[in-house]
C-alpha cells in the first residue's frame, strides 16, 4: 500500500536588502514567485527584516491581548462583517480572533489598544504590532507587484496598489474539549488577493 508524499512548498528567500524592480535579482525572484503560484498557489517566504526578537515580541503581545477578559475583548467592535473581535461562535467554537483594518495606521491600532485601559495600564504595545505589520505589508507589496508584472498588466500597478485594502487578523485556537470538536476553523476560501500567514510554531 503506497503512502502519499507530504506536500513540500517552495521556499523563496526575500532577505536581500536592496531588492529593486528591474534588477537581475528582482527578475529572478519574480520568476520563483510566479512558478510557485502557478504550481502550488503558495510558498514559504524567508524574510530577515523581521528579526526573531520582533517575532517573539509580537507573539507575546498577542498572548496579552487574548488573555484579556472576554467582556473586555468584546468591546473591540467594527461595523464591517468579521472585523473587530470574533470569538467562540457556534460554527467555530475553538477559535477567537481580532481583525484590525490597516494596522499601519496609528488610529486603527489605538482603537485596539484602548480597549485594554489607559496607556499606563495597557498591556498591549501599539509600537510592536505596528512594527511587525509594517514589515509584513512591505513583503505583501513586493509579492503583489511581482504577480502583476508576471501577468503583464503593469499599467494597472498603481491603481491596484492604491485600491488595496489591508487588514491584520490574529487568531488563537483552543484545544477540543469533546470528540465532536475536531476543527478549529471550517473549510473556507479567503476572498483577498494575497494572504500572508505567520504561525507561532505550535505543533498540531
Image (cartoon, rainbow, N blue to C red):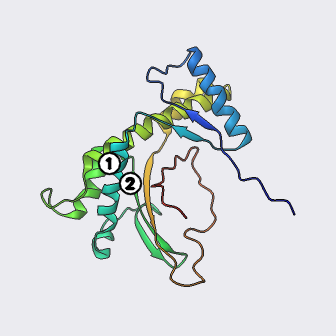
Q: Where is residue 21 in the image (x, y as percent from the top left)?
A: 53, 19
Quick check: 134 left or right of 71?
A: right
Q: Is residue 84 in view?
A: yes
| 113, above or below 29, in the image | below
Quadrant housing the N terminus: bottom right
User: Which is nearer the N-term, disc 2 or disc 1?
Assistant: 2
Quick check: 45 left or right of 62?
A: right
| 181, above or below 21, in the image | below
SS for callout 2: strand
The residue at the point 32 percent across, 41 percent down is 131
SS for callout 1: helix
Name the front one of labels 2 and 1: 1
Q: Which disc number belongs to residue 172? A: none
Q: Is residue 104 in view?
A: no
Dot 1: few (<14), some (14–19), or many (≥20) neighbours within 10 Å? many
The residue singled out by tag 1 in the image is: 129
| 58, above or below 88, in the image | above
The residue at the point 65 percent across, 39 percent down is 10
Q: Where is residue 57 in the image (x, y as percent from the top left)?
A: 31, 49
The residue at the point 43 percent across, 60 percent down is 83
The residue at the point 35 percent across, 65 percent down is 77
User: From this viewpoint, which residue is outermost toward the left?
Assistant: 120
The residue singled out by tag 2 in the image is: 100
Disc 2 to disc 1: CB gap under 8 Å: yes
Q: In which quarter of the image is residue 38?
A: top right
Q: Quadrant of residue 37?
A: top right
Closest to the observer, 8 or 78 = 8
Amino acid at each position: 500500500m503506497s503512502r502519499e508524499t507530504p506536500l513540500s512548498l517552495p521556499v523563496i528567500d526575500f532577505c536581500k536588502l536592496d531588492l529593486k524592480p528591474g534588477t537581475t535579482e528582482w527578475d529572478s525572484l519574480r520568476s520563483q514567485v510566479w512558478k510557485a503560484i502557478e504550481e502550488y498557489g503558495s510558498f514559504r517566504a524567508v524574510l530577515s527584516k523581521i528579526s526573531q526578537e520582533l517575532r517573539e515580541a509580537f507573539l507575546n503581545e498577542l498572548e496579552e491581548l487574548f488573555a484579556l477578559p472576554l467582556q473586555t475583548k468584546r468591546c473591540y467592535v467594527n461595523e464591517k462583517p468579521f472585523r473587530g473581535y470574533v470569538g467562540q461562535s457556534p460554527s467555530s467554537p475553538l477559535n477567537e480572533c481580532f481583525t484590525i483594518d490597516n494596522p499601519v495606521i496609528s488610529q486603527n491600532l489605538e482603537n485596539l489598544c484602548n480597549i485594554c485601559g489607559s496607556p499606563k495600564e495597557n498591556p498591549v504595545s501599539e509600537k510592536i504590532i505596528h512594527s511587525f505589520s509594517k514589515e509584513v505589508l512591505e513583503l505583501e507589496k513586493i509579492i503583489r507587484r511581482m504577480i502583476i508584472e508576471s501577468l503583464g498588466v503593469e499599467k494597472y500597478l498603481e491603481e491596484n496598489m492604491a485600491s488595496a485594502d489591508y487588514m491584520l487578523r490574529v487568531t488563537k485556537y483552543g484545544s477540543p474539549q469533546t470528540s465532536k470538536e475536531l476543527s478549529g476553523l471550517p473549510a473556507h476560501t479567503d476572498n483577498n488577493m494575497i494572504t500572508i500567514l505567520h504561525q507561532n510554531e505550535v505543533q498540531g
